[in-house]
Image (spheres, rainbow, N blue to C red):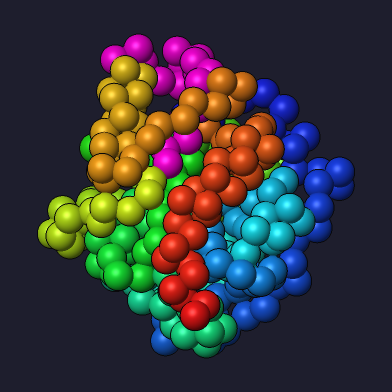
């Protein structure tokens, strides 16, 4: 888990488009905030650990012209209740499906997942393969990255504070709670069945992080894991974001939008069937 240290907060400023208005729903496990905008193919946004919907702001409003965009704040994030239980895949995906049923956002879905959100999207695709038209992983966590996640939790919290310009105490508890659920989440992925043969793109940051953030050995393993993610589907491809570290949606939003639009074109047949 690596975060680029330089000026990422600059990309989440007033020059980017406003996010859609927040809404909320009382689910079985607590109140969750969410946003929805646009029309067309259903695009689901899975945020990384400790990152609220604000982390997607550089993609708006352009992304809402590509389809119906749905995102939500997991428990502990802005507008959602504090986590009352370990956020494993069962809890997170169960709550997500409550939101989707309430908002009537229909499958098939194109999953767009950043960092830790990649594990939840990985599980979603395996559990509900008939509902998934395609997947876009953005610096997504691989199941075998969990050792690095635990080792670098404190660095993650500090770096998020710089990126989001908020005191670490405001989200440190939730980051810890989410990372505590990773082991179980990885086991859920391992027993959920195969990844579906859908169009898949893995967008990987090309910048080399500081040694203090990740050792050369861990960096090599992470890069190999990114290649492994692209091999999950016979229709998978890796794309390198050469000017990005761990947050390509902040440092190169235009590239993320380009890859997403191209992926939507590849998935077009599934979406035509959905709208028929």
Q: Is residue 174 visible?
A: no
Q: Residue furthest right?
A: 15
The picture places residue 118, in percent across and down from the top left corner, at 39, 49
Left or right of 262: which side holds 251? right
The picture places residue 17, in percent across and down from the top left corner, at 81, 52
**What residue span does the magenta drawing correspond to?**
201-217
Q: Is residue 153 above or below residue 19?
A: above
**Quadrant in the picture for residue 8:** top right
Q: Which sits in the foreground, 93 or 172?
A: 93
In the image, what residue occupies the spot 80% across and 58% down?
A: 18
The quadrant the N terminus occupies is top left
Count the marks.
0
In the image, what residue occupies the spot 42% across and 86% down?
A: 28
The picture places residue 263, in percent across and down from the top left corner, at 50, 48
* Residue 216 on the magenta segment: yes
* Residue 273 on the magenta segment: no
Q: Is residue 34 above or below residue 221?
A: below
Q: Which sits in the foreground, 139 or 198?
A: 198
Q: Is residue 236 visible?
A: yes
Q: Is residue 218 above or below residue 185?
A: above
In the image, what residue occupies the spot 49% across and 15% down?
A: 208
Q: Which sits in the foreground, 145 or 40?
A: 40
**Quadrant in the picture for residue 134:** bottom left
Q: Is residue 90 above or below residue 158?
A: below
In the image, what residue occupies the spot 54% across and 63% down?
A: 43
Q: Which sits in the foreground, 223 or 271?
A: 271
The picture places residue 24, in percent across and down from the top left corner, at 62, 80
């Amino acid at each position: 888990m690596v975060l680029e240290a330089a000026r990422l907060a600059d990309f989440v400023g007033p020059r980017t488009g406003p996010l859609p208005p927040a809404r909320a729903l009382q689910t079985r496990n607590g109140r969750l905030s969410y946003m929805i905008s646009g029309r067309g193919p259903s695009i689901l946004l899975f945020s990384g650990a400790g990152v609220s919907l604000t982390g997607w702001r550089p993609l708006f409003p352009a992304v809402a012209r590509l389809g119906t965009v749905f995102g939500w704040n997991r428990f502990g994030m802005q507008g959602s209740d504090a986590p009352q239980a370990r956020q494993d895949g069962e809890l997170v995906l169960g709550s997500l499906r409550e939101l989707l049923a309430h908002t009537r956002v229909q499958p098939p879905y194109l999953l767009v997942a950043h960092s830790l959100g990649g594990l939840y999207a990985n599980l979603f695709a395996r559990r509900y393969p008939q509902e998934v038209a395609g997947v876009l992983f953005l610096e997504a966590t691989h199941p075998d990255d969990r050792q690095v996640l635990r080792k670098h939790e404190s660095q993650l919290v500090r770096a998020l504070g710089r990126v989001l310009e908020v005191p670490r105490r405001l989200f440190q508890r939730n980051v810890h709670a989410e990372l505590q659920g990773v082991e179980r989440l990885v086991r859920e992925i391992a027993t959920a069945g195969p990844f579906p043969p859908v169009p898949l793109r893995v967008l990987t940051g090309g910048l080399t992080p500081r040694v203090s953030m990740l050792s050369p050995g861990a960096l090599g393993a992470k890069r190999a894991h990114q290649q492994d993610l692209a091999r999950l589907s016979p229709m998978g491809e890796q794309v390198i974001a050469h000017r990005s570290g761990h947050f390509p949606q902040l440092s190169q939003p235009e590239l993320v939008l380009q890859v997403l639009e191209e992926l939507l074109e590849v998935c077009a047949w599934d979406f035509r069937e959905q709208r028929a």
